[in-house]
Each structure stands twice: as structure tokens, then as C-alpha cells.
Amino acid sequence: MGLGDALADFNLKALDLRTQRAELEVGIVYPKTNPSREWVELAECRGVDPSIFFPHRNAEPAKRICARCVVKQRCQHYADEMNVKHGVWGGVSDRGRKKAKGLKR
């Protein structure tokens, strides 16, 4: 195995770990048995790879999905309510939520 193959293998494993982390976080934040999350059934992100909403750098793909979502405000409110620290929720990144909280104080 050459250096290029090793790097490609490493990148695939890293992507898989990020996806698993995103799925775990979504599962924790949105337990499947929680009846108060019926609005999630209407979300544009339903069925989309969760890793898109937990990006390391570029949050734009997630924000584009959220932009056309009918429950975007409810999602933002939920992230604020639950003090969600990571990911794009209702079109707002974790950095955006931190910035908004700083302005509210």
C-alpha cells in the first residue's frame, strides 16, 4: 500500500467516524421515542446524511437544506431550548448560535 492509498483509507475512516458521531448526537438530541418531536417528521433534513449537519468547516450545504425547510424556526428554537452545542440546526451553525447568545446577554 502506497502513501496515497494509506491517506485515502485514513480519510474514509475519518469520514465514517464523523458520520457515526453525527448519528449518535442526533440520536441523543432527538430520541426516537420523544413524542414532542413530531415536527421533525416535516423537516427537510429527514433522511439526509446527518454528517452534513455536523461539518468541520463548510456549513453551507446544511444551511441550503434548512433554507427551504418548513420547520426551520422550530428547529432553531429546539436547539436553543436544549442548549445544543454542535451542528447546524434550523440553518444556524454552532458558531452562529454562540454569536447570537452573546448578543442576547
Image (tube, grey):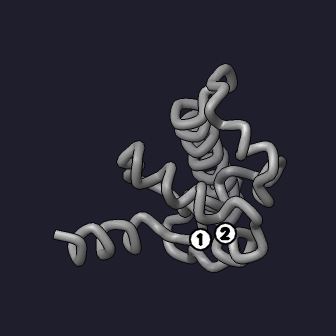
User: Residue at point 37% right, 52% down?
Assistant: 85
* Residue visible at 30% across and 75% down in the picture: 99
Residue 90 falls in which quadrant of the image?
Answer: bottom right
Q: Which amino acid type corresponds to the residue marked 1 in the rendered image? A: Gly
Q: Residue at x 63, y 39 (%)?
A: 23
Mark identifier at residue 91: 1
The residue tagged with tag 2: helix, strand or loop?
helix
Q: Nearer the viewer, residue 12 or 20?
A: 20
Q: In this orientation, which residue lies closer to the viewer: 35 or 30?
A: 35
Q: Earlier in the sequence, mark 1 or mark 2?
A: 2
Relative horizontal placement of residue 95, taking residue 66 as reference (left or right): left
Q: Is the residue marked by circle 1 packed among few (<14), some (14-19), or many (20+) residues within 10 Å?
A: many
- What amino acid is at disc 2? Ala
Name above or below for residue 64 compared with residue 35: below
Above-or-below relation of 64 to 78: below
Q: How many badges with numbers are in the image?
A: 2
Asked which quadrant contains residue 4, the reply is bottom right
Q: For the point 59% across and 64% down, which residue is it? A: 73
Tell which residue pokes out farthest to the top in this image: 33
Name the element at disc 1: loop
Q: Looking at the image, can residue 37 be seen?
A: yes
Mark seen at residue 62: 2
Neighbor class of circle 2 (other Cα within 10 Å; few <14, some 14-19, many 20+) is: many
Q: CA distance from mark 1 to mark 2?
A: 7 Å
Q: Nearer the viewer, residue 71 or 65?
A: 71
Q: Position of residue 45 (x, y in %)?
A: 76, 56
Q: Are marks 1 and 2 in contact (CB under 8 Å)?
A: yes
What is the x, y in percent for residue 67? 70, 76
Say which quadrant the C terminus sits in: bottom left
Q: Position of residue 31 (x, y in %)?
A: 61, 27
